[in-house]
Image (cartoon, helix red, strand yellow):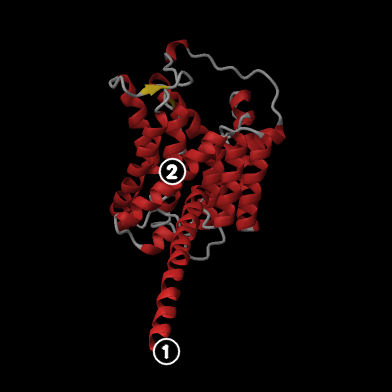
């Protein structure tokens, strides 16, 4: 009798092992999806899944790299013994997502995916480093690790033959640069592509899905993302930006991230001027994007999300002295 009871308990214990493993996998997958959603400053696994679907619709290959980058970033954070809450919130995964995506898009060769996934792993460590360095300032790290890491890897292609740059990134001589503002702008495409360009996407359906993902996380966040995209489009047009770039949403994605960060995510204490400062910061991303893109032309580098980082840091740092901002 006693032996039978023990056998039953042992069987129950053995049968429970797969459920524990499955639970760990679900936990890892959920944290990874949140890492994807954290790219647009959202902690929501469903939003992350919608974004992943949008990316996969654009490219199955890019969708796989995105998911693997998110998982790698999460695993590196776990292996490194990072704070469990930060891992669960996806705060150590979003830079890995962007780094993996950027490197697989901006590098060439059959093995660029290896470099992209290695970059995703390094991005998680770099994010932890920056979080520690920025802790005393109370200013968020944002996407700075992804930007710097991606720029340096792309620049290394000029000295390392084993890493090859994509033919889409061509250094240009500023003395021969000509501004082309011809052509018409499709307003709807420009607005939708603005949110899509956060993830390097420029098609209608993925843009709609990503907007849905943001609205799912919160109506206010969704509204801010639309406002940011519209603002960038009209400011860029008013300032005489290239119509092609405006229509592709290349002036919009930094504005979207900035208005969400300044007006909602990092607004701090109740501040009735938070939306206004977010709008101004979003508008500022347009000339900064233009200036930074010009500065990077001789190196053939994309501006990425550096305008978002600079404008957000500008406002959040100013708030330390002028809290009404």
Q: Residue at x 44, y 66 (%)?
A: 20
- Nearest to viewer (mark 2 / mark 1): 1
Where residue 65 sits: x, y (%)? 47, 39
Label 2–label 1 contact, CB within 8 A: no
182 to the left or right of 263: right
Q: Which residue is mark 2?
A: 69
Q: Which residue is mark 1?
A: 1
Q: Residue at x 47, y 34 (%)?
A: 288
173 up-or-down from 262: above or below: above
Judging from the image, what secondary structure is the residue with disc 1 in?
A: loop
Say whether residue 284 is visible: no
Where residue 102 sits: x, y (%)? 45, 34
Q: Residue at x 56, y 45 (%)?
A: 52
From this viewpoint, which residue is outermost toward the bottom? 1
Q: Quadrant of residue 122?
A: top left
Say whether residue 163 is visible: yes
Q: Residue at x 39, y 38 (%)?
A: 117
Where residue 249 sits: x, y (%)? 60, 33
Judging from the image, what secondary structure is the residue with disc 2 in?
A: helix
């Amino acid at each position: 009798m006693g032996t039978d009871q023990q056998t039953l308990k042992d069987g129950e214990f053995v049968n429970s092992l797969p459920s524990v493993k499955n639970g760990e996998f679900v936990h890892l997958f959920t944290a990874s999806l949140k890492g994807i959603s954290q790219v647009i400053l959202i902690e929501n696994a469903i939003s992350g899944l919608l974004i992943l679907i949008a990316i996969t619709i654009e490219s199955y290959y890019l969708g796989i790299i995105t998911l693997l980058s998110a998982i790698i970033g999460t695993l590196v954070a776990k292996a490194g013994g990072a704070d469990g809450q930060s891992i669960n919130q996806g705060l150590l995964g979003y830079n890995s997502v962007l780094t993996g995506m950027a490197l697989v898009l901006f590098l060439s060769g059959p093995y660029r995916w290896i470099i992209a996934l290695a970059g995703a792993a390094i991005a998680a460590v770099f994010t932890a480093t920056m979080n520690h360095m920025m802790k005393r300032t109370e200013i968020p790290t944002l996407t700075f690790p992804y930007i710097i890491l991606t720029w340096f890897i792309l620049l290394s292609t000029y000295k390392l033959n084993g890493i090859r740059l994509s033919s889409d990134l061509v250094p240009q001589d500023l003395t021969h640069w000509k501004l082309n503002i011809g052509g018409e702008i499709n307003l709807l495409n420009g607005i939708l592509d603005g949110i899509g360009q956060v993830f390097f996407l420029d098609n209608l359906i993925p843009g709609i899905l990503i907007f849905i993902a943001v609205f799912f996380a919160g109506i206010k966040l969704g509204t801010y993302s639309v406002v940011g995209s519209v603002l960038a489009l009209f400011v860029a047009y008013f300032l005489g930006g290239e119509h092609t770039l405006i229509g592709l949403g290349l002036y919009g994605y930094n504005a979207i991230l900035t208005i969400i960060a300044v007006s909602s995510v990092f607004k701090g204490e109740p501040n009735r001027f938070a939306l206004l400062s977010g709008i101004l910061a979003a508008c500022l991303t347009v000339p900064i994007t233009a200036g930074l893109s010009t500065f990077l032309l001789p190196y053939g580098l994309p501006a990425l999300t550096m305008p978002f980082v600079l404008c957000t840091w500008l406002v959040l740092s100013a708030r330390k002295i002028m809290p009404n901002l």
